[in-house]
Image (spheres, grey):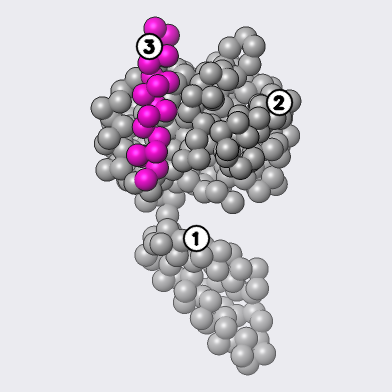
Amino acid sequence: MNRYRSLLFVPGNKPLWFKKVPGYETDAVILDLEDSVPPEVKEQARLDVANAISEIASSGTKVFVRINKGLQGFDLEDVKATLSVDLEGFVLPKVEGPEEIEELSKKLAEIESAKGIQEGTVKLLPILETARSMYFAYEIAICSRVIGITGLSAKNGDVERALGTQWTADGLETLYMRSKVVMAARAANVTPIGGLWQDVHNLEGLKKSSSFNRQLGFDGELLLHPSNVSIVNAIYSPTEEEIAFYEGMVQAFRNAEEQGISAIMYEGDHIDYAHVKTAETILSYAKSLNR
């Protein structure tokens, strides 16, 4: 399963910013051709983004492109211009349902073939920002090429408008939606992504919001500002204390297991095979981050 702690939006009409991406230490960057780009410069932005993908990817940062969507569906000119072997995938705005995803996937296969790229190489990350897409979260999550779905709680954003909620810092108004997205993603074995924190310079607010999202089960977040990356990466990474705790748990359990014991007390908690499996999963993820 693809996991990303941080996915940073960078406007597609800011090519000078592209060169700064490796220094942001974000797990992935989303070069945006949609909402952050004025209509009159979208064509030039498309060219600039296409020219930047390979260099950014060579730095180790995964590259996504958020394409536009019109009345006739997703913008295939965006797709044709930017699809390459170095592209991780497309971020899809304003998704309505799974039928759109499957139709786009078929068109992607044709474009991949025309460019000599293996079919299925380019992945999809749908943004659930319409009421219908949130309702059909699982059906979207199991679609071809989909590697994750989003449960966003941005102030005054598309989700708030779609659901008719009123934003609060505690975020209880979107608790059901976010939990549903996490459950749908886990059932489909794709990554659940949270965000977007709008008050980007309020880092304490970001920490509180991201920590709550982490508790709900998200793997990472969409971000709007480079200053948010390190904070979110830390929140979605096991701490040294957690690693030491789980390493000790596994060792204590294995020692007991050698004596024929399959349930122990460890630092005040009852531990059996289920708890050790959780510990090993967390330790495996921590090891992958270090690599």
Left or right of 290, for residue 263: right
> How far, Cα to Cα, is label 1 from label 3?
41 Å
Location of residue 25 by image quarter:
top left
The residue labelled by disc 2 is 103
Location of residue 100 by image quarter:
top right
The residue labelled by disc 3 is 41
The amino acid on which the numbered mark 1 sits, given as a three-letter code, is Tyr
In the image, what residue occupies the spot 56% across and 33% down?
115
In the image, what residue occupies the spot 55% across and 48% down?
2
The residue labelled by disc 1 is 285
Image coords of residue 247 (percent x, y): 47, 74
In contact (CB < 8 Å): disc 2 and disc 1:
no
Mark 2 burial class by Cα count in 10 Å: few <14, some 14-19, many 20+: few
Residue 30 highlighted magenta (yes or no): no
Whether residue 195 is situated above or below residue 11 in the rendered picture: below
Image coords of residue 257 (percent x, y): 62, 86
Helix, strand or loop under label 1:
helix
The amino acid on which the numbered mark 2 sits, given as a three-letter code, is Glu
Question: Which badge, 3 or 2, comes first in the chain's sequence?
Answer: 3
In this view of the protein, can residue 195 be seen by the observer?
Answer: no
Question: Which badge, 2 or 1, comes first in the chain's sequence?
Answer: 2
Q: Which residues are magenta?
A: 39-58
In the picture as drawn, the residue positioned furthest to the bottom comes out as 259
Mark 1 burial class by Cα count in 10 Å: few <14, some 14-19, many 20+: some
Most foreground residue, 176 or 108:
108
Whether residue 276 is situated above or below residue 210 in the rendered picture: below
